Image (tube, grey):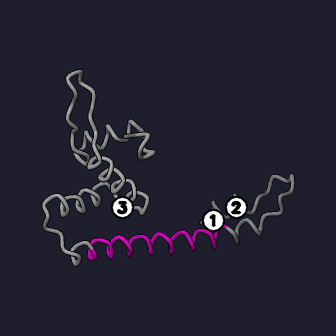
Amino acid sequence: MARATGCNLETIRYYEKIGIMPDPPRSTKGYRSYDDTHVRRLKFVMRSRDLGFSLEEVRGLLGLVDNRIQTCAEVQAMAEVHLGEVRAKIADLTRIERVLSETVARCTGDAAPDCAIIDALFDA
């Protein structure tokens, strides 16, 4: 399954341990036996993580799917909350980029011991 999805083997084991992925059936020799359902679920988890959903949020989404009680409205509400969090992070990063850019621009880059960046960090 690691090869089929590009997911790290240790990550798959971790997802199984925390219940995000179900334990697969085992062969008579004890090897895990994954099927297309496992691969599809892991791809869902990976894509959700790529979009920044926390493991608890992924668990919530999967809970809606597993219990077959999801409505588009419930999923939309969860995604809207997450989108708000993403937008807040973007705003924070934009502010950080602006302040850092202004601070770096004040630095002369000389070999002198005085540094505008160090001064700005102490004065903050």
Disc 2, disc 3: CB below 8 Å? no
Residue drawn 22% across the image and 38% down it: 24
Residue 86 figure quarter? bottom left
Residue at 14% x, 64% y: name it.
Answer: 68
| Label 3–label 1 contact, CB within 8 A | no
Helix, strand, or loop for circle 1?
A: helix
Q: Amino acid at mark 2?
A: Asp
**Which comes sooner in the sequence, label 3 or label 1?**
3
Circle number at residue 98: none
Q: Which residues are magenta?
A: 76-100
Image quadrant occupied by the N terminus: top left
Residue 123 disc label: 1
Front position in the image: 66 or 39? 39
Image vertical order of residue 98 relative to residue 45, above or below: below
Marks 3 and 1 sit apart, C-alpha to C-alpha, by: 36 Å
| Circles 1 and 2 in contact, beta carbons < 8 Å | yes
Which residue is found at the position 21% from the left and 30% from the top?
26
Q: Which residue is identified by label 3?
A: 53
**Quadrant of the frame with the C terminus:** bottom right
- Residue flagged by tag 1: what amino acid is it? Asp
Which image quadrant is residue 94 in?
A: bottom right
Name the main secondary structure of what is drawn in magenta.
helix
Mark 2–mark 3 Cα distance, whole angstroms, equals 37 Å
Which numbered dot is residue 119? Answer: 2
Establish if 59 lies above or below 35.
Answer: below
Image quadrant in which you'd find residue 72: bottom left
